[in-house]
Image (cartoon, rainbow, N blue to C red):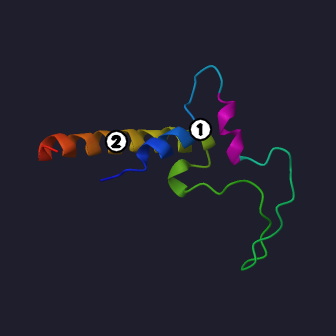
Amino acid sequence: MIHFLPILFCLVPVPHEADCTHSRFLENSANLDFGVQLNTGEKIHHVKLPPWAKQDPLLFIILNRKVINILSHFDTFLLWFLGT
């Protein structure tokens, strides 16, 4: 069903209670100039998170990992259920 999950799972960092700096890849902390969006002229700075992430990069990562984990178990369940 979902064959890319092992790759995707490796791309989403694991949140650690002691060190939450892994979410920095979503923020332009170096203030690099990425230019502007062609259609709006808006300056490109940090990654725009979806509304359900509540502008919290760590929440975004945690929720994505939960969904990926659920989907990977669902894929395993389907294989077991279908007997393949």
Residue at figure coordinates x 49%, y 46% from the top left = 8
Q: Say which element carries label 2.
A: helix
Which residue is labeled 2 in the image?
72
Q: Is residue 76 above or below residue 14?
A: below
Residue at figure coordinates x 50%, y 38% from the top left = 62
Instruction: Decide if residue 67 is on the left or right side of residue 83.
Output: right
Viewer-closest of 35 and 74: 74
User: Which disc is residue 58 wearing?
Assistant: 1
**Residue range (magenta):** 20-26
* Residue occupying the far top of the picture: 18
* Residue occupying the far bottom of the picture: 39
Instruction: Decide if residue 31 is on the left or right side of residue 59.
Output: right
| Quadrant (top left, top right, bottom left, bottom right) of the C terminus | top left
Question: Mark 2 or 1 closer to N-term?
Answer: 1
Instruction: Decide if residue 33 is on the left or right side of residue 44.
Output: right
Viewer-closest of 50 and 72: 72
